[in-house]
Amino acid sequence: MKIMVLGSGGREHALTCAFLKNRDVEKIYCVPGNGGTEDLEKCENVNLKTIDGIVRFCREKGIDLAMPGSEAALVKGIVDRLTEAGIKAFGPDRKAAMLEGSKAFAKDFMNKYGVRTAGYRSFSSYKDALGYLSECPFPAVIKADGLAAGKGVIICRRREEAEDALKLIMVDKHFGSSGDRVVIEEFLEGFEASIHCFFDGKTFLPLLSAKDHKKIGEGERGPNTGGMGVAAPNPGMTDELWEDFNKNILAPTKEGLLSEGLTFQGVIFFGVLVQNGRCYLLEYNMRMGDPETQGMLSLLDSDFTTLVTGTLSGKLENTELKWKEGCACCVVLASEGYPGTYRTGYEIKGITPDISSNIYMAGVQKKEGLPVTSGGRVLSVTAVGSNLEEARSLCYRDVEKISFKGKTFRKDIGL
């Protein structure tokens, strides 16, 4: 089997490693990949710039399965193009991808089908959005409507902060065209849970829950990032909360997907907030999360390739996943200044054979055979333990062994 994994982050490195555990996998092409995938046996990094080039390459190489990692490619319709070319692709078509590509579209969908979520209003006019602040209760959450790499969400405690946020998003265009429209949302307070469900077009198969840490600073302070670490399974997700999630989020989502013809073979990552024992849906993500993927897959005992091919074949109904005992902790090491301005090109040291954790590269390139930093989130360190405390201890032990100039990380992942 020949597989293509699209993306360059720690998620794609982890996905590639998971695919390689299957003996039937002959070759994996990573587009464009990174300094970690470059070193994997049976793996080749390929720098393809356009969807046309990707489709052409898949035809030439006889790719059996393509897995887009990033949301941007999905919103651009890469699954549509691959499917038209007769190539099996894991993920939503362009229409279904809008559940992540537009927060206003997603909120309208949730509202229509009774998915429990926070109250909201959406605006394409800066003047109208500004006017709404006079009646909006605070705190409030202001979100750029389009894709913003997990960074386009601003919690505003006061009206002045909301005014600044609207100017940043809609006038200054800090997130580009993603800020042409905004969603102003009711603020919910509680804990978040990341819940991934594979979907074969008719059946949902939930994976482990995870606890993501989105802010750059300890105690969830500072600006949003793409994710600074994760614990799996999420220690706060009780049986009662799973039941509530299934009834008030998963079931009405399935009804909406089938009613609207938004069926596909892929995954939905539900971003959930738990407030007072009730699950509220914050957002849909139509691909695997990063760094959730690194944490979850380290605990998966079932064959990942079989899971993906079963999803594409519409055969999830009787599938039972096997998980390892214990917990996983994943800590992201970032460049100093991320998620703002940062410098790259620094040598990474300390990734030696005595490290027991799984190291998944993201913003890493090879220069003269040595790994150097090339992005904001540089790499993730993932460890498994019999419980979360042990997983954290093992993970942070290895985090301390790795060094590069400006290394930035949170010390409270999993707490």
Image (tube, helix red, strand yellow):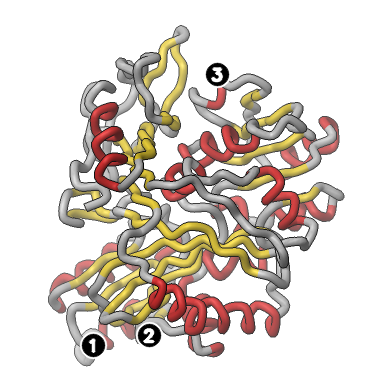
What residue occupies the far bottom of the structure in this picture? 135
Q: Secondary structure at mark 2?
A: strand
Which of 49/394 is in front? 394
Query: Which quadrant is home to the N terminus?
Result: top right
Which of 267/239 is in front? 239
The amino acid type of the residue labelled 2 equals: Arg
How much space separates mark 2 and mark 1, taking CA atoms? 10 Å
Q: Residue 346 at x, y = what percent? A: 31, 19
Which of 132/388 is in front? 388
Q: Which residue is mark 1?
A: 136
Q: Residue at x 48, y 57 (%)?
A: 208
The amino acid type of the residue labelled 3 equals: Asp
Q: Which residue is mark 2?
A: 121
Q: Where is 36 relative to 283, above or below?
A: above
What residue occupies the far top of the structure in this picture? 368
Q: Secondary structure at mark 3?
A: helix
Quarter of the rendering containing residue 59: top right
Q: Where is 310 relative to 187, above or below?
A: above
Contact between marks 2 and 1 (CB within 8 A): the answer is: yes
Q: Residue 125 at x, y = what percent? A: 39, 80
* Foreground label between 1 and 3: 3
Task: Indicate left or right for 241 with 343 as reference.
Answer: right
Q: Which residue is mark 3?
A: 39
* Foreground label between 3 and 2: 3
How much space separates mark 1 and mark 3, taking CA atoms? 52 Å
Quarter of the rendering containing residue 157: bottom left
The amino acid type of the residue labelled 1 equals: Cys
First-in-chain label (3 vs 2): 3
Q: Residue 115 at x, y = what percent? A: 49, 84
Q: Residue 153 at x, y = what percent? A: 32, 64
Across the whole image, how many numbered discs are drawn on residues?
Answer: 3
Contact between marks 1 and 3 (CB within 8 A): the answer is: no
